[in-house]
């Protein structure tokens, strides 16, 4: 009895200290002087531009990694090809690699004097998009692969014997089975794309009003001793991520959870 | 008619089918029988086009389909673990092949209703596969395969995942269904009793080869070799001779051609009794008797009896 309460208390206490306290503190500091200072902070021109940059990065990285993720998962699970084991491992690389290293690699590759240098990639939006795609790459793959493994190939073979082409089989049989895994992967990808700091920081050049994403803007405001601006932008980031999560939960029909 | 000529299929170092040739007559119900790993399922999947053979030719109704994908072969396939489309209702599962063929909606509705009547699932059309029993799911799988009017119907261990009672019901139902529809049907099973029960013809496979191809009765009465003899029923071996337990006679007195043995155990199987015996040289054999015979002999464990085979088979 005591053990069970201790376990609950421990788990909740851990969450409180690690998660709730910092987030709560940020919210509290944001609205310390009321709603309007926070509102003015996030509607400042540079803040709005940073928001726009972040949304553009997510709008590029999320669809790209969703399509890639589903195709890669199909390749890993359904087609044994030479080097598929290596491919499977390489997909996880962005999780293992420090984002700063990724940013640096992009700068060296595309920057002045790099192999592919001189195409307005580094210190511009394309570089930031590449960095965002890189760091948010594994999530859809990792969500879809186990589901594909679990459903097996029999349903797909049954569809084939009933006359369905490969595309029809995917659309009618495989996709319905993996769509919620894909959706969850999309939420994780979106969260990662919105929150990425290190890699984007290295390749962006921190040009306010040009190559500053919302996370970089938070740092910029904080270093400029504009605490309300920093906290308000951080809250905005958190709200976008939460909105994505809520959107998916409401879209998911009850029937699927049975 | 299905013609299989010289099919070889390898998986890496393992040869699953080692030059198999067989003909399945149109309108027949043929069973591919064999132990696991004998290649019977692989052969069925090669016929369906789900596996590509390394060598050999498959003809369906006189047409060479070896290079034709499963979509265009006109076969119905029923899977051991049902392969039900989990996100579709029973009706939608059965309608799948017709929808792919873009049949008019009214025709699909009518055909699906007929098929659900046929497989006795008419009242469960709006359920999802998860809400059905194993036997119901397999009947749905059969209706789904029949919906597209296949030239041949292929069933891979269709009753293997079901309990014994449902299995027996389903197979006699399937036999009646075949007698009505006369669709050329091939069933894969490892269960010799099931094969004997439903088949017009049995193709007995072992180690990627065909051991014998015959009617159930021929297979039992005139087995081609030792393997066939011991696979299709219990068998005693005395020297070079093979004897079925029901061909072993027990006498209380020796009569010259008998051998002595001791009763080890009596196993009551309802109407029949299996008598397990040990001869004085240590060889073990079993005899199958009716209950009346056992009572007349007053057999008890430990008793000495005299054994005489009434019928035996010797292979050269």
Image: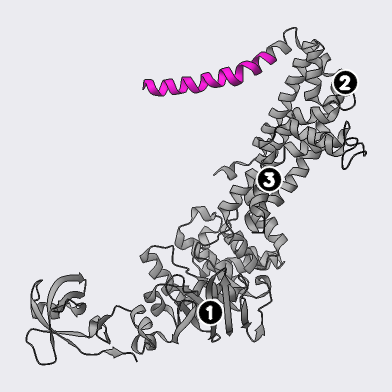
* Residue that lies at the very extreme toward the front in this rendered image: A113
Whether pointer 3 and pointer 2 mark residues with C-beta atoms closer than 8 Å, the reply is: no
Residue drawn at the location 76% of the way across and 35% of the way down? A102
Mark 3 lies on residue: A90
Name the chain under label 1.
Answer: B
- Quarter of the C terminus of chain B within the rendering: bottom left
B313 to the left or right of A141: left
Mark 2 lies on residue: A46
Whether pointer 1 and pointer 3 mark residues with C-beta atoms closer than 8 Å, the reply is: no
A192 to the left or right of B249: right
Residue B166 versus residue B57 in the image, above or below: above
Range of magenta residues: A1-26
Q: SS of the residue at dot 3?
A: helix
In the rendered image, residues at marks 3 and 2 fall on the same chain: yes
User: What secondary structure predominates along the stretch shown in magenta?
Assistant: helix
Q: How is the image coloured?
A: one colour
In the rendered image, residues at marks 2 and 1 fall on the same chain: no
Q: SS of the residue at dot 1?
A: strand
Mark 1 lies on residue: B18
Residue drawn at the location 78% of the way across and 19% of the way down? A219
B94 to the left or right of A230: left
Foreground disc of the pair 3, 2: 3
Residue A161 versus residue A131 in the image, above or below: below
Name the chain under label 3.
Answer: A
Q: Position of residue B26 (x, y in %)?
A: 56, 86
Q: Position of residue B219 (x, y in %)?
A: 38, 86
């Amino acid at each position: 009895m005591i053990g069970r309460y201790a376990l609950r208390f421990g788990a909740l206490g851990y969450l409180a200290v690690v998660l709730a306290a910092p987030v709560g503190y940020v919210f509290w500091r944001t609205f310390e002087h009321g709603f309007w200072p926070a509102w003015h902070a996030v509607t400042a021109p540079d803040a709005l531009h940073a928001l726009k940059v972040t949304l553009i990065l997510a709008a590029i990285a999320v669809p790209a990694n969703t399509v890639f993720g589903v195709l890669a998962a199909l390749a890993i699970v359904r087609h044994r090809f030479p080097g598929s084991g290596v491919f499977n491992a390489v997909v996880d690389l962005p999780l293992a690699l420090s984002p700063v290293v990724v940013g640096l690699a992009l700068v060296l590759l595309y920057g002045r004097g790099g192999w592919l240098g001189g195409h307005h990639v580094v210190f511009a939006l394309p570089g930031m998009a590449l960095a965002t795609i890189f760091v948010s790459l594994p999530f859809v793959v990792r969500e879809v692969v186990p589901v594909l493994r679990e459903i097996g190939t029999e349903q797909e073979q049954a569809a084939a014997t009933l006359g369905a082409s490969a595309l029809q089989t995917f659309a009618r049989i495989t996709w319905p089975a993996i769509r919620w895994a894909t959706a969850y992967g999309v939420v994780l990808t979106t969260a990662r794309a919105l929150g990425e700091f290190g890699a984007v920081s290295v390749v962006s050049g921190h040009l306010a009003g040009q190559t500053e994403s919302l996370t970089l803007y938070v740092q910029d405001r904080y270093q400029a001793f504009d605490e309300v601006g920093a906290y308000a932008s951080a809250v905005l980031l958190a709200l976008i991520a939460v909105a994505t999560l809520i959107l998916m939960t409401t879209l998911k029909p009850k029937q699927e959870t049975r | 008619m299905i013609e299989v000529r010289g099919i070889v299929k390898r998986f890496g170092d393992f040869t699953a089918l080692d030059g198999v040739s067989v003909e399945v007559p149109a309108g027949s119900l043929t069973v591919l029988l064999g132990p696991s790993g004998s290649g019977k399922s692989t052969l069925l999947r090669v016929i369906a086009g789900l596996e590509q053979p390394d060598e050999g030719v498959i003809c369906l109704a006189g047409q060479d389909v070896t290079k034709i994908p499963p979509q265009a072969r006109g076969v119905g396939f029923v899977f051991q673990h049902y392969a039900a489309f989990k996100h579709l209702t029973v009706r939608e599962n059965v309608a799948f092949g017709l929808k792919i063929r873009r049949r008019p909606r009214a025709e699909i509705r009518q055909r699906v209703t007929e098929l659900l009547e046929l497989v006795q699932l008419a009242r469960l059309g709006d359920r999802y596969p998860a809400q059905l029993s194993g036997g119901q799911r397999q009947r749905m799988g059969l209706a789904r395969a029949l919906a597209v009017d296949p030239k041949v119907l292929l069933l891979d261990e269709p009753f293997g995942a079901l309990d014994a009672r449902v299995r027996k019901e389903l197979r006699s139902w399937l036999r009646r269904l075949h007698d009505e529809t006369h669709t050329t049907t091939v069933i894969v099973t490892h269960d010799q009793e099931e094969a004997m029960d439903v088949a017009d013809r049995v193709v007995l496979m072992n180690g990627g080869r065909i051991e014998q191809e015959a009617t159930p009765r021929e297979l039992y009465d005139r087995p081609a070799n030792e393997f066939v003899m011991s696979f299709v029923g219990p068998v005693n071996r005395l020297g070079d001779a093979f004897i079925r337990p029901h061909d072993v006679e027990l006498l209380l007195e020796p009569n010259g051609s008998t051998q002595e043995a001791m009763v080890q155990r009596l196993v009551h199987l309802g109407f029949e009794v299996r008598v397990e015996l040990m001869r004085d040289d240590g060889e073990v054999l079993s005899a199958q008797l009716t209950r009346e015979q056992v009572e007349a002999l007053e057999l008890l464990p430990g008793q000495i009896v005299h054994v005489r085979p009434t019928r035996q088979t010797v292979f050269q």
